[in-house]
Amino acid sequence: MGLLSNRIGRSSLKPGDHIYSWRTAYIYAHHGIYVGDDRVIHFTRRGQEVGTGTVLDLILVSSGPSRGHTHCPTCVPPNEGHGVVSSCLNCFLAGGVLYRFEYSVNAAHFLAKARGGTCTLAVSDANDIVVHRAKHILQNGFGCYDVFKNNCEDFAIYCKTGLLVLEGRTMGQSGQAVSIIGGPIAAILSSPMRLVTTNVYGMAATAVGVYCASRYATDIGMRADVAKVEVEDLTRRLSMGLFQVIEPPLAAIALPTTS
């Protein structure tokens, strides 16, 4: 585990590890919880690793696993269901490289990781608790998949910490979702600097500062709008509709613009 890479070897895996693998062109990473016996539990959109229900899927799917990768007979993704699946490690990686998500990092280390979705300031719970949460959710679901509010990284972070963003949330726990949104926001917020300076380097430094500040403030370990939720209570409240994440309608996939 280093500052530049969280890459690990399979021999160092432990049940309860939050692992991930970058897909083609590093557009996104797929996250899951290793539960031992070569199995990984992860959250998907109807068996697909990632999805928005919009035309944006054309870009995301193109960065997904190679079509040449064949799932083993025990890991065929379901066509329907709640989206939480169990796969062998090979199928989870889909030919990609294995990385381990870091917890309890300090602020300097966190900010040095320019790309979100690799570490957090939050503290992980014990590995046996993490595995219990993942297995319980495998049987009971994690609500509707949403690429920005309730995705595979959100699932893995919840399993590790038990922390959940409260109802009415506009953004989940996902660091990579914050990175995708934070970059454009940083550029927009820094644009007024052109009124006081024509120095492109000054504007770039401001944009970087805004981006880093947004990542730090929205990390699950720093947010004030989170609560510790027992997994049994989570799935009960999901079944009663008390946690709401609305999935985009399937019809939106054919639309020429995102909804």
Image: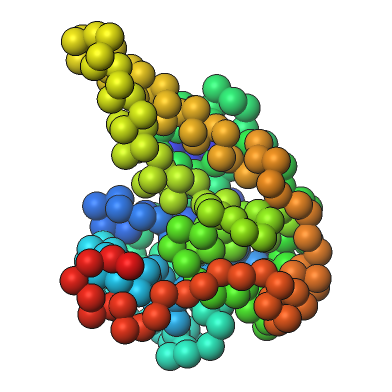
Q: What residue lies at 71% left-to-right and 72% top-to-bottom?
A: 242
Give the percent coordinates (x, y) of residue 220: 63, 44
Q: Nearer the viewer, residue 132 or 192?
A: 192
In the displayed structure image, the side of residue 179 where residue 187 appears, left or right: left
Give the percent coordinates (x, y) of residue 43: 53, 71
Q: What residue lies at 55% left-to-right and 22% top-to-bottom?
A: 108
Q: Is residue 50 above or below residue 241?
A: above
Q: Quadrant of residue 47?
A: bottom left
Q: Is residue 38 above or below residue 22?
A: below
Residue 61 visible in the snapshot = no
Q: Nearer the viewer, residue 147 or 26?
A: 147
Q: What residue lies at 24% left-to-right and 16% top-to-bottom?
A: 194
Q: Quadrant of residue 259?
A: bottom left
Q: What is the residue that sits farthest to the front in this orientation?
A: 195
Give the percent coordinates (x, y) of residue 96: 35, 59
In the displayed structure image, the side of residue 84 where residue 129 appears, left or right: right
Q: Is residue 173 above or below residue 224?
A: below
Q: What residue lies at 61% left-to-right and 70% top-to-bottom?
A: 244
Give the percent coordinates (x, y) of residue 245: 56, 69
